[in-house]
Amino acid sequence: MLTLEEKDENNNDNGSNGNNGNNKTVETFFNNASNVNKGTADEYKKRLRLFARFINETYSLSLDELVKTLIVEGYGPRIDPYDMFSKYIGWLKKGGTMSPRSIKTWVSTARHYLETLDVEISPRKWQLKVKLPRIVRTHKEALSKEDIQIILNACSSPKLKTYVLFLASTGCRATEALSIRLCDINFNVSPTTVFLRGEYTKTQTDRHLLLTYETTEQLKAWLKFKYRTRNIGYYDKNTRTTLNKAVTPIMNNKLFIFSTTTENNPNLEYLYTTFLMAFEKTLDRRGGKYAELEDDNKRRRKITLHSFRRFVKSTISDLGFADYSEYYIGHQGSVYWQRSPREKVDLFLKCEPYLTFLNYGDLERKGADTQTRLEVIENENRELKENIYKIMEMIQQNPSLAKVKPEVLAKKIR
């Protein structure tokens, strides 16, 4: 079943009359908004095209004609904007493909568009006359380290496994990770660094990531697999036989590392959809709580690619580095929290064991070292307590010893 957006795109491709005459206003609107980035502009255009389709189906008007009807006295049929938006909400609900949160967002975009073009909409009347669907907030599934290990082991391809591990160790947004190229990774430093280009980040700000040793090794393994020599079969029309030839892809530093193409970069939205579908299939194979859906619309999953971002933020915060966790996942954070690059690396190294999932040998070795240190500390504490008890007994038997330095009494005990 096609969503409303997909139907709208099909109509555009087929030259549907539903959107003819609307592009002029929409394009002018975004050409004048110089501070809107391309990704946001594309999303708003998609929303406005759907709104234009509703206006055409309901009132047989284009967006240009609608605006004139609403702001020019005596032009065309009189339309009540509040009644129009109420019908628009019902129209979106009838499609059955949008959650209440999505409907609220798309209606808000259409309202903002009309207000920008001087259509008067009273906030008080809006509140009284336009009833938006109620948003029911659901509990977000919390992932544990064991859950992530199970998901990683269930990944059917090295590409998906590398991508999921990258998200789970860096806390990146899904499309931010997909935008990384080979030239953005510096394997010559320790820990490995990754440069995120601001044009692909939500905050439109460049930033650098630090990779765990485990993620670094997995990335190297994936790149080795991606550019491996492989045998490709092809049909020879002359001999009418199927032949094989060895092909080694040429490494291109400008290509997305998580793309399997070796010639041109694919569309980032298409690449995201491909990974999302593969990830959801992995969750379905695991079944149980991994395949559960949220209760509000039975379409959105409890575990999503964004769940790894929440895990990273929570893990680092629980270690006592709340400000660093904001910096690590790319939030603005406090303007007063500033650290030198060396200090940031030191903080990362403290968090690294908690962001390592499949390097069992390293985890066991560090666990053994930690256990040994704990045992040494426990023995020292036990010995100190025993010495204190003995000193207290000596003072009770001879009160004059209370004036003697504790160091001297400890030497007598030994």
Image (spheres, grey):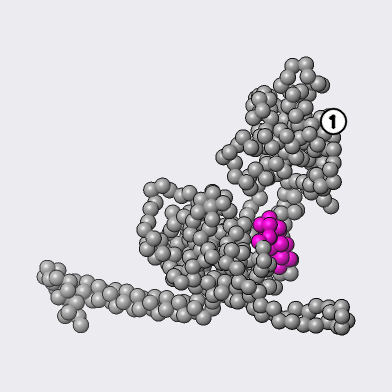
Q: Residues within 10 Å of mark 1 (few under 14, many from 20)?
A: few
Pinpoint residue 176: horizontal percent, then vertical percent: 58, 57
Can you identify the residue that label 1 sits on? Answer: 60
Residue shown at 49%/56% (left/top)?
207
Q: Is residue 304 above or below residue 371?
A: above
Residue 241 point in image, percent of width and height: 86, 83
Magenta residues span 265-282
Q: Is residue 121 left or right of residue 84?
A: left
Which residue is outermost to the top? 74
Q: Main secondary structure of the magenta part?
A: helix
Q: How many marks?
A: 1
Quadrant that contains the C terminus: bottom left
Residue pictured at 73% horizontal, 26% vertical:
67
Identify the residue shown where x is 16% and y is 80%.
Answer: 412
Q: Reply yes or no: does residue 46 show up in magenta.
A: no
Q: Nearer the viewer, residue 232 or 61?
A: 232
